Image: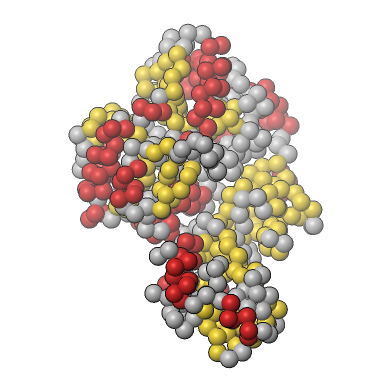
Amino acid sequence: MYPPELKYTKDHEWIRIEGTTGAVGITNFAQQQLGDVVYVELPEVGAPLTAGQPFGTIESVKAVSELFAPVSGEVTEVNADLKNHPEQVNSRPHDTWMIRVRLSNPGEAASLLDSTAYQSLTGE
Amino acid sequence: MTDSADIPLKKTSLHAAHVALGARMVPFAGWHMPVEYSGISAEHLTVRSAAGLFDVSHMGEIEIAGKDALAAVQHLTSNDASKLQVNQAQYSALMTPKGAFVDDLLVYRFAPNHFLLVVNASNIDKDYAWIAEHAGQAGDVAVVNSSDRYALIALQGPKARHILQSLTGIELSGIKYYWFAHGEIAGVRGTVSRTGYTGEDGFEVFVAPNMARRVWDAILEAGPSDGVVPCGLGARDTLRLEAAMRLYGNDIDDTTSVLEADLGWIVGWNKSEFIGHDMLRRQKAAGVKRRLVGFAMIDRAIARHGHVVMRENEQVGHVTSGTQTPFLKKAIGMAYVPAHMADTGTEFEIDIRGRRARAIVVAMPFYKRPKT
């Protein structure tokens, strides 16, 4: 259910790490809880990230939720597609990246959850 | 709304049906209520294109009956109930002496001297106490909180009449908007009113709670070829917002006058007296200082309840309701702004989590159903 090659946070973000770069999104559990996503607010390229701190917001019809950075570093790319097609987050949560990052401290990845640990966290 | 940890949530008589349908249940006004079944957007769109079924049994029903019932209703409510024929209903308000809202409600005239007031779930006890306190001034009248005696099911959408007609001998096309009739629905005695909170054609069905499940199931079974789906409070809120219907607690409360809320049309100015009438008359003469307006976002952002309205760096008002709605697919909302900013076309800014986004006043309602 949760791709084994991804790492996860307890706030329901995932990160796909390749060396010192990564791509970040939210999990299937998160998109289910949110409902239909209507708006995603993302940072600018170059913005700094601190692990555990909010980097943006995601909005459904009913609610606004913060997005928390899984790792520290810098934003290198932002998914512009989400401006007009935020619903991709609902339909393909693990394939829809929001930001790409350059990790300032690759060691942080070790404290993230693997897919098994994340799955048991969600109680699914 | 939060609920005290000590008081268990109440369940409507349709609770088991919601659970069986896989609804996501949330606490609302002290009740377990379904917020969505298949998703807020999907449900919202289905109501606009086919039909949606809502359990609104949590709402309250207060009966006023007796020789002086009309006088009591006239004294307590904003609208002119003497205009009501038997089997007719009107949108109205219970007002404070300042002309602000104790609640908004529908007044049904069941018989010449027997009225049913349908009130918000969150205000049942407050409204009953208020009515009981003030009705006696009108004379010989009984006030009864009958909320436990009614389940209320709303079927809303262009296909609603077709679906409901297959279950009742009442000629539904003969019921005009804001009128009601008594009869049988799915073999159950009840009352059907042509009212609703979605901006679509539709009906609200009053039946005894112990019969509600039978009626609910019958409507869902009668409807599949028309595409009826169960709908929760989430879609109820987005639908009513597109139709610019006020929500107590968001857009109206005991700090907002009926005129400020731009609901002057529910005031029976010809009535000789009613609670709040002095204040409203004065406010009408002097003009309101602030007004509830509809707005649409210009910048790409979503304004929500509580966000501050800014004009030239000054806080001038606040958003009462707002979201991006599924049918219009626009970020819209309602806000109180100073009266001089209330004309359509006026632009202002809204502070959304520290960032300013531009919005423009638009005419309400945001959505009007196509004439059929």
Residue lying farthest to the bottom in this orientation: A19
- Viewer-nearest residue: A78 or B273: A78
Spot occupied by residue B301 in the image (x, y as percentages of width and height): 61, 64
Q: Among all residues in the image, which is located at the extreme right?
A: B313
The residue at 43%/9% (across/down) is B67
Q: Residue at x 57, y 69 (%)?
A: A40
Q: Quadrant of residue A3?
A: bottom left
Query: Is residue A92 visible in the rendered structure shown here?
Result: no
What residue is at 64 percent from the left and 28 percent from the top? B99
Front in this rendered view, residue A31 or A42: A31
| Quarter of the picture holding the N terminus of chain B | top right
x and y, in percent, of residue A122 in the image: 46, 65
The structure residue drawn at horizontal position 55% and vertical position 89%, both measured from the top left corner, is A18
With B33 as the anchor, is B295 left or right in this view?
A: right
Along the line of sight, which residue is nearer the eye, A41 or A112?
A: A112
Instruction: Establish if B325 lies above or below B168.
Output: below
* Front residue of A28 and B268: A28
Query: Which quadrant of the structure image shows residue B353?
Result: bottom right
Q: How far from the left and from the top, in percent, is residue B297?
A: 61, 60
